[in-house]
Image (cartoon, rainbow, N blue to C red):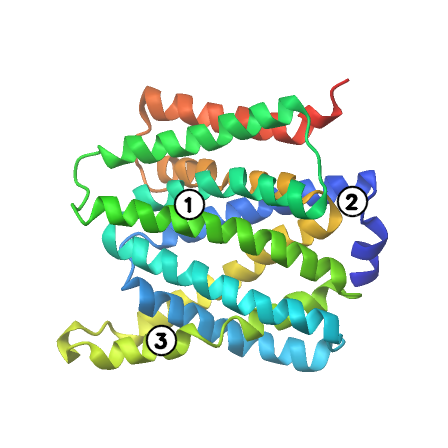
Amino acid sequence: MSETIVALTGTPQGAQLALILALVSAFAHAAFGALQKGRHDPWLTRGAIDLWLAVLSAPVALILVPWPSPWVWGFLAGAVGLHLAYKLTMALAYERAPYTVVYPVVRGTGPLITLGFAIAVLGESYAPLQWLGVAALSGGILALSGVNLHRPGLGAGDIGRGIAWALAAGVAVAAYTTWDALGIRAAADPFTFLAWFFLVTALDFPLIAAWRWRQMAPAARPAPGPLMLRGLVGALVAWVSFGGVTLATRLDKVGEAAVLRETSTLFAALIGWAVLGERVGPLRAALMALIAAGAVLVEFGGRAG
């Protein structure tokens, strides 16, 4: 598998595989979003996910893949800090604002900033039609957040601070997407980077969650069984979601993979309608169509002319 990924990098076939991986990643991320309805405390949930990620990734990293080179170790060290910043800002945002508001803000701001990083750091370039697609996709996602903000039944929360933390999380997404793309490209075996990434970046939040658990009143602590089951499911989804999009950045342009990943918001809305029985309405349907059109322009706009 590693040899196939390396051989396809930079080829038309690699670009097609990157498209598939980015869309699979988006769907996986949306499916996990559906699982988070009625979620536990976000700090405990993230801690359970990371605990399982460490448990599942350790044998792969220690036994099944080659060890990282010194150069790759440097990228892994940087990834620990960037992903900790992302997880902290996401937990702080979820504490203060509803999921349906926070999630689109993070996913809508991330692609715009990622494209800027990809151009400045990686020297990528994009056609005018692709920029139009990014504007359509991000604008549609952010508009969905605004629509959700005014839906009845949402908890009040500290909406303003929640959105501010969500914007910070969007910046963190762009930073770690670009950094991780550099890391997986520096590794001779892309699965070496992924296995060790999932291991080393999963060691912090279980400690934070354990501290938070001890600070909670016993009556407020959730049952460990359902929490750990949710963590296991989240860890498996993370391997598909993050692993897929990171492999896509190895195969093709970072900016395109990052933008296509954010169609997760579209998949989340479709899951809500088809599986959870949520009403879509004409406005949300139009915004979903705008997001889909933006994704098409990003993927194919660079091939026009």
Which residue is at a point 55% across and 56% down the rendered structure image?
Answer: 176
From the image, state whether disc 3 or disc 2 is nearer to you.
3
Q: Position of residue 148 (x, y in %)?
A: 28, 35
In the picture, the quarter occupied by the N terminus is bottom right
> Which residue carries the number 1 mark?
106
Q: Is residue 269 left or right of residue 61?
A: left
Could you tell me if the residues under marks 1 and 2 are in contact, i.e. CB atoms within 8 Å? no
Residue type indicated by callout 2: Gly
Q: Secondary structure at mark 1?
A: helix
Q: In the figure, residue 220 lies in which quadrant? A: bottom left
Residue type indicated by callout 3: Ile
Which residue is at a point 47% across and 24% down the rendered structure image?
Answer: 289
Q: Does residue 163 sit above or below 288 in this rendering? A: below
Could you tell me if the residues under marks 3 and 2 are in contact, i.e. CB atoms within 8 Å? no
Instruction: Tell me if residue 126 can be seen.
Output: yes
Q: Is residue 190 left or right of residue 110?
A: right
> Which residue carries the number 3 mark?
208
> Which residue carries the number 2 mark?
14
